Amino acid sequence: MTAINVIKDVSLTFRGILKYVTFFKNSCTWSQNKIKQYQYKKLKKLLISATDVPYYRKLFAEIDFDPTKDFNSLEDLSKIPILTKDLAKKNKHLLANPKYTRSSIIMRTSGSTGQPFEVDVYHKAWIVEQAVVWRHWIWSGYRFRDKMAIVRSYVPKREDELIKKDRLRNFIFFSPFHMNDQHMSLYLKRMIKEKVKIIRGYPSSVFLLANFVLRTNHEIPKLKFILTASEELKDHDRKVIEKAFKVKVTNHYGLAEVCVMMGDCDAHNGLHNYDDYGYLELHEIGVENERKIIGTNLHNLAYPLIRYDTGDIAVLKDEDDHGECPHSFNTVANIKGRADQYILTNEGYKIPTVNFYTLFESFQEVIKWQIIQKKVHEIEVRTTFESLSEKRKKELVSGFYKRLPKDFEINFIENNGFIQKNEGKINAFISEIKK
């Protein structure tokens, strides 16, 4: 989630499109040598500017590292210790560069473990963000103002407002909180009527829609492609979605921490790391063909997360699986990140829990949170926070009730511990309903 007004958002988006046309349209075809030269140049600038960041000024002194003279190749980046999520959150106020935060945008994430995090994004880095996202869409066949159906994030004020039209961006939003058979039929009919060209949504929401199409043989809109993001897209779910809608899925991987970004192109032969956006390191974890993702954004001078451990896992491609693709970026087969689960209701809704991750993005006062479902139509919400005003508590409670049926039972528990699973790990969502 970004703290940014609509006018500024549109302005930076158009500057991003211009940046794509003038630079990022062609940088994806560079030779590996040219890409590495570009990465070195950007990292050198980033590391030197990081000496103005309190956390890195102290760290560089401790490890006796002077980026001006000690960073002479990409390999030298390994001299800097990996930054874990826990360490970043503990030092979050020491990671900002005051020279660049005045013109920054705030990105907020709830975190896959239920721990919020806030990152400053330099406005020039956000322009790059828009440029590479635009490139990702163009690769798949997007054309300016193609009508897009959005099945994510939209929270209707009333149940008779499940669909909202955004004429400026030519988007139509469909509530992901009311996806029973009756409403999914309504959604598909509206998409057909509006001649929607693209469906964009969480993999879990689009999978529900695809599964409904296959179960009922429902008529579908004539699409160009489907965009998914923000969750793990399993190979099985991709096949179901593509079978139902008869188009390819274009998957996207990115982080609110803006470290690395990946996506598949029109060849659909794996996810390209955008090597002109972030420097990717893949570290062994003891599992064949799986690597930990460590990333460094090349452009975010306002909040340089250097060698940031994303907590996500890349699945490597088979060595013989090269495919035909004109883009020179490094490629992985898939990402194993947060695989979403569903909150179950009496009405037959399966509400992807990612919708509540996005709710907590707006509540940075919450240190940690956890949702537990023990019965259908009932959840327990556990939170811990340093200070949360009564007004903000009411806003949080209201946010849950807006996303769930009126008679849904929600039990809020404050500062009273969390349920641990899997050798002490605290998951953001736990379902104890027997399948």
Image (spheres, rainbow, N blue to C red):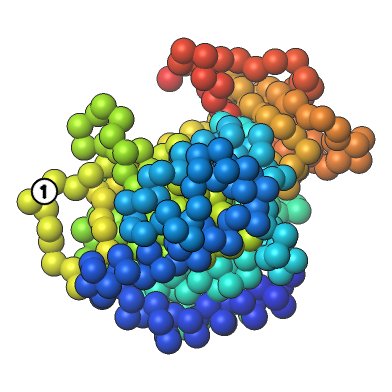
Hey, which residue is sitting farthest left in the picture? 320
Residue at the image point whose x is 46% and y is 53% from the top:
296
Residue 107's spot in the image, x, y percent? 64, 55
The front one of 54 and 153 is: 54
- Helix, strand or loop at label 1? It is loop
- Three-letter amino acid code of the residue under disc 1: Glu
Q: Quadrant of residue 73?
A: bottom left
Sort mark 1 into few (<14), some (14-19) or many (20+) by Cα contacts within 10 Å.
few
Residue 407's spot in the image, x, y percent? 74, 31
- Does 24 appear above or below 105? below
Residue 429's spot in the image, x, y percent? 56, 28
Name the residue tied to disc 1: 319
The front one of 33 and 224 is: 33
Give the quadrant of the N terminus.
bottom right
- Does 146 appear above or below 62? below
Hey, which residue is sitting farthest right in the picture? 390
**Position of residue 430 in the picture relative to residue 44 (left or right):** right
